[in-house]
Amino acid sequence: MTNLFSIFDPSTSMKINLNWMSLLLGMMITPSWYWMMSGRYLMMMMKMLNKMNNEFKMLIKLSINKGSTLMFISLFVLVMMNNSIGLYPYLFTSTSHLSVTLSIALPMWLSFMLMGWLKNTKHMFTHLVPMSTPSTLMPLMVCIETISNLIRPVTLSVRLTANMIAGHLILTLLGNNMMEMSFMMLPIMTLIQTTLMILESMVAIIQGYVMATLSILYSSEVN
């Protein structure tokens, strides 16, 4: 069981923390012509980003915050790229560590809270009590809303970390057991592994979308 979690160890065999360089691996392996000339990859990426931009426009008031979608689209691409990189053999999944996910969620949540309490103080106070709340339940609702606001960076980071760790652990467990299985069970196990790999690839994209969407909803509440 101790070796099971060794895939999430950021240290290499020489005890050098070079695995954290996987955060920049997506930009390093991207060829320079990708940014300068059109192609199929650029067309596919632009279609995806335009689709994301149209969806994020419905959640943000662009008349007030023009260009805000670019920040959340960048967040989506960053999380999706790091989640997908971890699916390759012998590559480190940086988003499976709380030190990475919390360093993304905490400054973003803190900036939202500071902007809301300094710019829209009355709105933030009224947001602590939902509409149509009985007067007897108002003190309790204030406590519940305060706690829910305080744990938002934790829920954002833990959700992403837990999903990445769960999928990688299942793939690792099945991969280790394949060495001890009979020859007749290998095709079935290979099919299961392929299905899980496709599912994990979808989870890598969905988790980036969920984190970007929740960040937009949190920012719209304080604006």
Image (cartoon, helix red, strand yellow):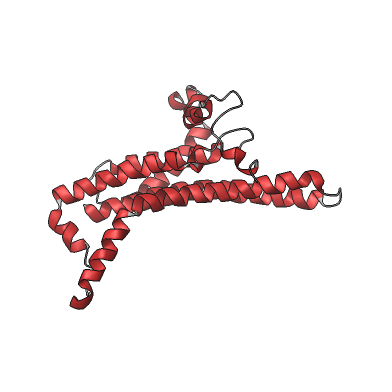
User: In the figure, residue 3 lies in which quadrant?
Assistant: top right
- Evaluate whether residue 104 shows in this view: yes
Decide if residue 221 is on the left or right side of residue 159: left
- Residue depicted at x 77% and y 46%: 178
User: In the figure, residue 58 lies in which quadrant?
Assistant: bottom left
**Which one is in front, 176 or 208?**
176
Residue 214 screen position, x and y as percent: 37, 53
- Residue depicted at x 44% and y 38%: 78
Residue 199 screen position, x and y as percent: 60, 51
- Residue depicted at x 34% and y 54%: 151
Decide if residue 30 is on the left or right side of residue 146: right
**Which one is in front, 207 or 142?**
142
Residue 96 screen position, x and y as percent: 51, 42
Decide if residue 177 is on the left or right side of residue 73: right
Q: Residue furthest front?
A: 2
- Residue depicted at x 61% and y 36%: 88
Give the number of marks. Answer: 0
**Which one is in front, 11 or 48?**
11
- Evaluate whether residue 60 shows in this view: no
Q: Residue furthest right?
A: 183
Residue 84 screen position, x and y as percent: 54, 40
Residue 138, above or below 114: below
